[in-house]
Image: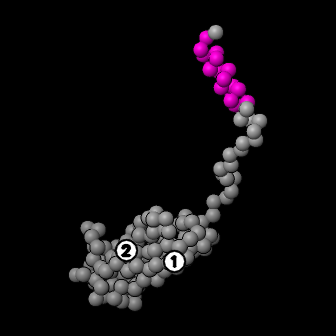
Amino acid sequence: MELSKVLSGLAGCVLATASLTGCVIVDHDDEPFTSGSLTVALTIDGSNDPWECFDHDVSGLAVSVEDEDGYVVDGAVDCDDFGLTLDGLYEGYYDVDVWLVDFDGYAMSDIVRVEGVDVLDGVDTLVKVDFPTRWIDR
């Protein structure tokens, strides 16, 4: 008897036995993905006037969001947008770091950390951050 016939017969027996045991693997692909979002709203010295960005040579706003498992999502926008929304976040608690950057992408402000931001499914969570001018490096 050929070895290949023995091996295929053995494999067939194993598969037949496994099907009789009732072993079922469920991966939950049929469950709808729900998520929330997090919006960071920026002001400079209490103002969201685009001239504040120009006056302080600020090019953009950078945001880093870290979940409880250490997974990080980063984002950046032009300063005069005065806000950034990160979509597709799972429900849970996040730590949010926000800082201002210059035209070369280098940090030019203190980093503001907001801890324990609660993101809920189907909800846009708002985090407001103000940068006093004394926190901006010139």
Instruction: Provide the secondary structure element on which disc 2 rests.
Output: strand
Residue type, numbered disc 2: Leu
Magenta residues (range)? 2-16
Crowd rating for badge 1 (residues with CA inside 10 Å; few <14, some 14–19, many 20+):
some
Q: Is residue 73 visible?
A: no
Residue placed most toward the observer, 3 or 70:
3
Q: Residue drawn at (39%, 76%), measured in percent from left and top?
A: 98
x and y percentages locating residue 115 in the rendered image? 46, 78
- In the picture of the structure, the residue carrying the numbered disc 2 is 61
**Which residue lies at the image location 57% right of the left edge and 66% below the top edge?**
90
Q: Which residue is mark 1?
A: 117
- Residue 32 in view here: yes
Please provide percent x and percent y for residue 6. 64, 17
Q: How is the image coloured?
A: one colour
Q: Which element type, helix, strand or loop, lies under badge 1?
A: strand
Task: Name the one closer to the observer, 87 or 81.
Answer: 87
Front residue of 80 and 64: 64
